[in-house]
Amino acid sequence: MEIDKNSIDFFVPLTGDIFKTLIEKSPVPNSLYIGRQLVIGLANDAMLRLWGKDGSVIGKPYWEALPELKGQPVFQLLEEVYNTGQPYQAREDRLDLLVNGRFQTFYFNFTFTPLKDEDGNVWGILNTATDVTELVLTRQHLIASEEQKSFSLDAAELGTWELDPVNYTIKWDERSKELLGADVSDSVSFEEALEYVHVEDRDNVQKAVICALDPLNGSGYSVEFRTAKTAKGSERWLLGKGKAYFNSRGGANRCAGTLLDITDEVKARQEREKLLTLVEHSADAMAVADLDTSVIYINKACQLLLGFSDRKALKVRDFYPPEVFEWVKEHVWPKVSEEGSWKGNLTLRHAETGVHIPVFTNFICIYDPINGSIIGRAATLRDLRPEIRSQLEQRKLLSLVENTDDFIAVANLDGNLVYLNKAGLQLIGANSLFEAIRPFSELLAEDDKVFFDREILNRLNNQGKWSGKLKFRHLLFEENILCFVNMFMISDPMTDGPTGIACVARDLRPELAAQKALAESEQLFRDITTAAPAALWMTDVNGDVTYVNQIWADWTGMPLEWHQGKGWLDMIVPEDRDHVEEKFNADFKVRALHESEFRIKGRDGNEHYIVFTGNPQYDPYVNFKGYIGAAVDITEQKQLQNQKDEFLSIASHELKTPITSMKAYLQVLSKMLDDRGDKSLISFAAKANKQVNKLTSLISDLLDVTKIQAGKMVLNITPVDLNDLVNSFNEQHLLSDKHYITVKGSCNVMVNGDWHRLEQVMENLISNASKYSPDSDEIIITIEQLPDKVKISVTDFGIGIPEEKLSLVFDRFFRVEKTSQQFSGLGLGLFISYQIVKQHGGEMGVTSKEGVGSTFWFSLPY
């Protein structure tokens, strides 16, 4: 009869001689039934004798091998265990077997244990049976004869006991006392008897007895338990069985039973569970297949290794790439059949990803325990990928060692060289390792040989490492080469004992040459900086000045060392010092470009204006090193700027009077021409008046600039409602025939400000928005009330501003180059607006994108 291919076969080949010996040599009958058809996969000699059969029943379904059992409960019990997955345990169950052509009655203690895969599916049933026919028949005969009872109990090694339900005392025979390890009288209390039961099993025994004494329960007493660890003799497992007898009133008047030593049976059961657990949880992948290449069992490790979602309906071909499977069939399996085993490397395939997995495979044959024929193949699989990765890492490490510029050598514990890398060979002038092999000390210069033998070896043996400078000897040119050396003991990874000495050395010649070149470069740098017209300075990573050149000392009239650390700040006039120090510390903290302007008291007694700039510096590993910067004396430029500002102020004031007169004369002229009705001349007068207004606006801007530069702009602060300010432009200011203003948002708080100056800011922003959006017809003003301020934005949809120019738009006289010819103006409106907002304690900014438009905004605190 063919075995069900969807079932999981027995695991004998997975556990080797231990399991086979346990099953075949066990005096306890054991057998294994496979699949829903309950095919007999294994039955030891004890079980075959019990059945009265030979080995020919192996491989047949249970009902076919033992047809005489049809109609008896055993078939129904087996099907129930297979379907429910619940074990069944029976004591002294009757079974009629065909012996020598006739049926005979037997009694057995037997267990049906379901075997399950990882998903909880039953794939087989393990049957353990003990023939207790003689025991049962003996007990039956006890009714007729007490003498026969005593004889039968002794023969079956049964102990007897009797419980008095009224006094709760127990009488037991010598065999019972021997089994429990009790050295007491023949009658004891129930509590005293429990002292000979293992502490963990006492509750179960007590509950079983109480249950037996309950007339409503209707069942006997049956419980397995261990003897107490402190009892006389070794711990053992006992089976207690008994029954209570009741009077007509339902009261228990007697409870009697037996004790049987089942230690061997329990141990066999425990060993079986151990073997099952060992196989299922083995780190190595394991699989079993029949001769038809159907996989009948894989353990959890194999399932994980090959990515099988379940263990059902697998074929051996599912394990391999196609070409490998064909090679295994042609070369490996014949060898397994001939020699019983095969070991080697193969390539498997992951079921889900298709990734190839190299494994070391050990094939063995599975033999029929009865006739010795091959019935299947088993394999253990070890994933080789970690080993391959380790070898790859070793090759990488060896390649790194071989190609590094450092000298790397290995010597044995006697100090004799056994390995030297390519850089080491070049350093000492050897062409090959064979040429270099010698005591390590002979690679050193004469004055370092003795030091190595006496000091370094002693340090390595005691402390495990040494580092310092040694001179190596070039074998051809007898040149002594100074190196920095690290030496350490090499330990065995298994025993942690020393196995050799490693040496890593760095040739110091390039470093010494670099130090010399650096010293020369530093001197050259100092010579250059001394001759430079600007003052140069340097700080460390803490912001303390470590260097200034002679120019700074000449400006201040103080010696160079005076300016170290924070001393340079003392040269700044008190009015500027705090601001400069605060800005420098803020920029230094975030490693930002620093620029500040301040005054110093020069050695000539006059104040000098200085522009102070600095950049953060980093080493090749991007570690911050400090700042390097320069200081330039701009006193002359400042004087020229002041003269220019003074000229603009005087010119603006001087121009204001004649412009005012011109405007008055034009207004009178316009009135006279209007009275005469000369429309053409009126038009000319209007155009002239418009230009005068434009000139007046420019002069006003210039006057504002001079006030700002001189710090003389005065604000007339009053509460201002920004809603009214914005809406006044929306209602009254017609900027052009083409543009219209849309106002979004509002605020319900007042700000302190100068209405006319804030109106000037809005005028500038809206005027610019109109001017620089000739192809658009909309300007949007947005009012936002934020937690601590009000923000007003003016958005246009015009030409926009290049991103790289955004930071300059608020500078005085700045105009974008490509718009300066197309649009008129001096570039003062945004500068003045920025200064007005700043003087109000507010902020101003811009966002823009070329060809899309710009948004200028300013915010004022409540």
Image: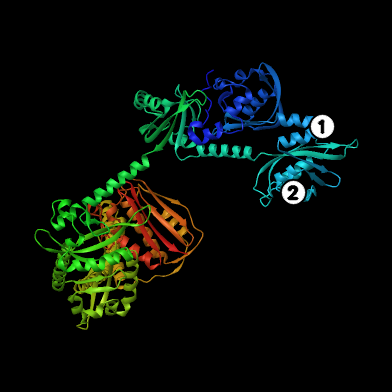
Residue named by callout 2: 194
Q: How many marks?
A: 2
> Residue 777's x, y, as percent?
36, 46
**Does any portion of residue 775 appear in the rendered image?**
no
Residue sitting nearer the eye, 155 or 25: 155
Q: Is residue 276 visible?
A: yes
Amino acid type of the residue tagged 1 in the rendering: Ser
Residue beneath disc 1: 145
Q: Amino acid at mark 2?
A: Leu
Q: Quadrant of residue 620?
A: bottom left
| Dot 2 or dot 1, earlier in sequence | 1
In the image: residue 107, left or right of residue 768: right
Give how far across and how far down residue 76 sits, in percent.
67, 24
Q: Position of residue 818 (x, y in %)?
A: 23, 51
Can you say whether 708 is above or below 209 in the image? below
Q: Nearer the viewer, residue 81 or 631?
A: 81
Secondary structure type for disc 1: loop
Q: Does 594 sit left or right of 290 as displayed?
A: left
Q: Quadrant of residue 341?
A: top left
Q: Residue furthest bottom?
A: 605
* Secondary structure found at label 2: helix
Q: Residue at x 67, y 24 (%)?
A: 74
